[in-house]
Image (spheres, rainbow, N blue to C red):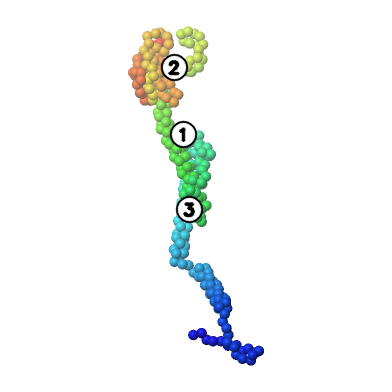
Amino acid sequence: MARIKYYYDTETCKYERVKVRTWDVFLNLLGFLSIALLIAVGLLWGFTKYFESPKEMVLRKENEELKLHYDILDQEMEYVRAMLANLQERDDNVYRVIFEAEPIPSSIRKAGAGGSEKYKNLLDESLLQEELILKDFKAIDLLKRQMYVQTKSYDDIIDLALNKEKMMAAIPAIQPITNKELTRLASGFGMRIHPIYKVKRLHTGLDFSAPRGTPIYATGGGKVKKAVTSYRKTGYGNYIEIDHGFGYVTKYAHMQMLAVKKGQKVKRGDLIGYVGSTGGSTAP
């Protein structure tokens, strides 16, 4: 039961009973609740500011682990960039120099990457580190493009190496007659007086003088394009023409006898015929 309160009325000189109005009770209650609410809000703010909830502790730990993983990933990407730069430098300054190929232009090396819009669609719009993640996506995409360019460059180098080996085997690089059998170099390339017609003409070959029947060898690998036997007293007489590829063709004229047929493949040093004096020739 609530205690009854009195107050002293100076006019009547009596103690009068205090009348409690409903409005006063409501105001008192409202004030009490307001103060209680302020105290609760303050306590909650202080708790959330200085103390972590279990969920926040888990999130903080996950963020720390993610940051560590990101730092490791960033270091690995720097390492890959350095390795790729080293490969590009060796490609341009060593391999392509060896095989006499032009270096890849820097504009192609950079392999310009597209925008980041295609990655934004994959990410949650609420991510706090969206720009950082997009930066990594773009960096990885650029590395992939540059590695693709480098891979294609190595494919070209392999083709060059294979062709270089074939070309080195095909280029005419030896005499068709051994020095032991060679009597003399009768005539070189250039203008001369024709030995039969006695007029000045361009001589488009080399005349090797050797005993009749001396073996003649292919000066480089290739395919016999022509194998002609002629009984005419003019022209090249019996001759063989070899297509070595890579723009090289050799012709062996005035032979006594052929040792290969048209379409036959030969290697450098293979026997292809014998020295003679057929066609427009004055001596073997």
Residue pushed farthest front? Answer: 12
Q: Which residue is mark 1?
A: 99
- Residue 120: x and y in percent read 49, 49
Mark 3 residue element:
loop
Amino acid type of the residue tagged 1 in the rendering: Phe
Residue at left 44%, top 66%? Answer: 54
- Residue 154: x and y in percent read 44, 38
Residue at left 44%, top 23%? Answer: 248
The mark that comes first in sequence, 1 or 3, is: 1
Q: Which residue is mark 2?
A: 207
**Camera-side residue of 79 and 93:** 79
- Quadrant assignment for the C terminus: top left
Residue at left 46%, top 53%? Answer: 73
- Residue 191: x and y in percent read 51, 15
The reply to whether dot 2 and dot 3 touch (C-beta < 8 Å) is no
In front of the other: label 1 or label 3?
A: 3
Q: Which residue is mark 3?
A: 124
**Camera-side residue of 155 and 224:** 155
The mark that comes first in sequence, 2 or 3, is: 3
Q: Quadrant of residue 247?
A: top left
In front of the other: label 2 or label 3?
A: 3
Q: Give the side of residue 152 with respect to residue 262, left or right.
A: right
Residue at left 41%, top 13%? Answer: 236
The mark that comes first in sequence, 2 or 1, is: 1
Q: Is residue 229 above or below residue 15?
A: above
Q: Give the side of residue 272 with respect to residue 22, left or right.
A: left
